[in-house]
Amino acid sequence: MGKIVVLIPAYKPEEKMLKLLESLSSFSGGSAAGDRREKEDHAGINTEKPISAETAEIDGIVIVDDGGQEEYRALFDAAEAMGCRVVHHEVNRGKGAAIRTGIREAMECFGADVHVVTADADGQHLPKDILRVARAVLDHNARGDAARPVLVLGVRDFSGRDVPARSRLGNRITAAFFRLSTGTSCGDTQTGLRGIPAALLPLSMETEGDRYEYEMNFLTEAVSKADLVQIPIETVYEEGNRTSHFRPVRDSMLIYKKPLRYAASAAGSAAVDWALFLILLRLFGVSAFTSGTAGAAQGAAGAAGTAAGAAGAAAAAARIGSGLFNFELNRRWSFQSKGHAGREAVRYLLLFGGNMLCNAGIVSAFSYAGMPAALGKAAADVTLFIVNYHVQKRWVFGSPRKR
């Protein structure tokens, strides 16, 4: 059946963490089903109803003290006295690092077949919802389909009036980006309530990022290897979400680091590409902004015989120059690859060749149809920009997995 461990990364927690642990502890280690009742209402946590059959008993709770100051030590000591396993970071290392530490502890203490449910320490996840996610990850991963594990997310409803504007806007942006980059819809990409099956724990340990970007990085990688189940949970925001340690500008930059760097690299490469394209068109005697030729076509354009051929040749030649520039920039900066340079160069060359043919073909086709060469190239570039991001991220510069 598998074991369930609840993992709570905590940085400068409040008393509400202990109240959450009190509720969860009553479902740890064999309480009789008929006696299972949630505790009294603590800090706005409505726990008056009986726990339903949808919930699961948990086998342990792991708390990671992510470098909080000495004044918070008493809270972690109290958690340990309740029977939780507490691991301390000497300094603040970030949520991603804390999650990896907690997963490592869970696997060492409960075995590699454990399922881990991550939850936040600030009271935003109710005990009943944590236990529902635990039940779901148990049920969905007990069906013997090892090739397709199931990742369970507790998703919030961001349409309510009590949801802070920054949270609503941030979710919409990340949801749109996530669907564009993975092809999968997710109602709450940044939820901290996640049921991670044992089959995905190795991936969770390999995922890059030490802070908030870790959760997006893991989710992006996980949906390519697992099915996604989303369970609606109650949305809890108190006092404008003041207990959140999320820094909107800095942490958003971390979350979108790779696509932002890729976009900047693409912009630089596009500038090189367009400069070469316009220079070559001028040398070939072809107008970039009107159909046909600008006077008598000479040189390569004359040899080709048509403005369409000249436009295609210019696009291909420009792509060679910008491709060399783009490879080095993406390898060293955008994706910060640590893979074998020769292997990546061969893969990039294959992608580059396909891109050059597609780009030249699209530009030539549009030019033949009477569209100005510059407009045809813009259409080709937009299409290939999205395709290239996925191929480079997953294949050309993809991190080699441990075997």
Image: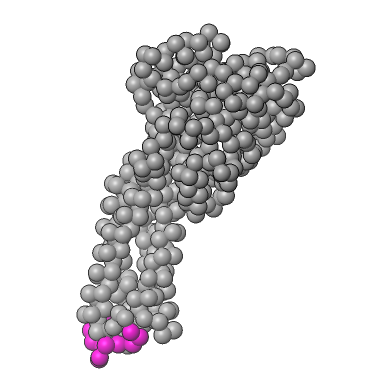
User: Eyeballing the image, is 398 above or below 30?
Assistant: below
Task: Residue 122: give x, y in percent of width and height.
Answer: 50, 27
Task: Residue 152: give x, y in percent of width and height.
Answer: 61, 36
Image quadrant in which you'd find residue 398: top left
Q: Residue furthest bottom?
A: 296
Quadrant the N terminus occupies: top right
Depth check: give the residue in front, 221 or 324: 221
Depth check: give the residue in front, 351 or 159: 159
Colouring chosen for the image of the structure: one colour
The residue range painted magenta reads 290-300
Image quadrant in which you'd find residue 136: top right
Taking the spot 40% from the left edge, 82% from the top edge, the residue there is 371
Q: Indicate left or right for 246 with 235 as reference.
A: left
Q: Is residue 276 magenta?
A: no
Taking the spot 42% from the left edge, 79% from the top edge, the residue there is 366
The secondary structure that dominates the magenta segment is loop
Q: Does the magenta stretch include residue 292?
A: yes
Q: Indicate left or right for 220 with 233 as reference.
A: left
Q: Indicate left or right for 69 with 122 as reference.
A: left
